[in-house]
Structure formats: C-alpha cells, structure tokens
Image (tube, rainbow, N blue to C red):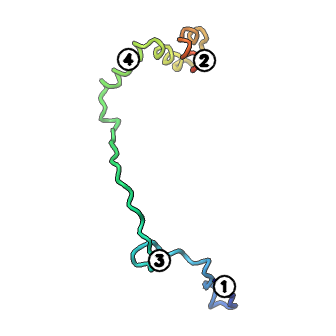
Amino acid sequence: MTIVHKAGNIHKNSNGLRRWALANTPENPAYVPLEAEPQIPIEEINITDIGTEFFEEVRESYKQDKNCHILTSLLDKDCKDTSLVNTLDEVWKNSYS
C-alpha cells in the first residue's frame, strides 16, 4: 500500500492510517466471526442474605481453635504483643512473623 500526500484542505482526511477501524459486524466486508466462549454460570452470594447466625458460628469456631483465637486477639491490638505471639504453635508463629 502506498500513501500519497495530496496538498490542500479538501484532502485532509484522506490518510488511511488515520481512519477509524470498521466494526466487526456482518455488514463489514472484512467481518470475522468471533468464537463463542462457553457461558460459565456464576453462583452469587449476597452478603445481606447471610444471617447473623452464620457470622456468630464463624466467630465461635475461631474461639475454639487456639491459634485462630490468638491471631484474632493479635489483630485487634494496635501494637505487637510478643508474649502473645510466643503462645502460638511453631508453624503459626513462623507464618505470623
């Protein structure tokens, strides 16, 4: 393809590189159909639909697990409590540090 410059106001928009691309629709002579992607259903949970019982059950399960209870206590504090960190099991302590 060769682009030839033509001087004058009448030919200002004749540059093929500055034209908008045509939409990929069946009306376009260069139309290429896109492959249809499989539709994957998304299961949705609305947080307002979850009752307070669920959150209370989660809190209780954290209290029953020693390490989870210590971690939630550590996260509630503004400063790092090393004595509380030392009560964690070794694997949890290494992950927290």
Residue 89 coordinates in the image, percent (x, y): 53, 11
Q: Of helix, strand and loop, which one carries label 4?
A: helix
Q: Left or right? Give the position of 81 relative to 60.
A: right
Q: Of helix, strand and loop, which one carries label 1?
A: loop
Which sits earlier in the primary sequence, circle 1 or circle 3? 1
Q: Of helix, strand and loop, which one carries label 3?
A: loop
Measuring 37% from the left and 16% from the top, which residue is drawn there?
A: 60
Q: Left or right? Give the position of 57 relative to 9.
A: left
Can you identify the residue that label 1 sits on?
3
| Picture layout, residue 17 above or below residue 35 | below
Which sits earlier in the primary sequence, circle 4 or circle 2? 4
Q: Of helix, strand and loop, which one carries label 2?
A: loop
Amino acid type, label 1:
Ile
Quadrant assignment, res 66: top left
Whole-Å distance between the Cαs marked 1 and 2? Answer: 69 Å
Q: CB under 8 Å between callouts 1 and 3?
A: no
Residue 40 coordinates in the image, percent (x, y): 35, 49
Local crowd at mark 2 within 10 Å, few (<14), some, or many (≥20)?
Answer: few
User: Considering depth in this image, is 7 or 41 the residue closer to the camera?
Assistant: 41
Can you identify the residue that label 4 sits on?
61
Which label sits in the foreground, 4 or 2? 4
Whole-Å distance between the Cαs marked 1 and 4? Answer: 72 Å
Residue 79: image tag? 2
Which sits earlier in the primary sequence, circle 1 or circle 4? 1
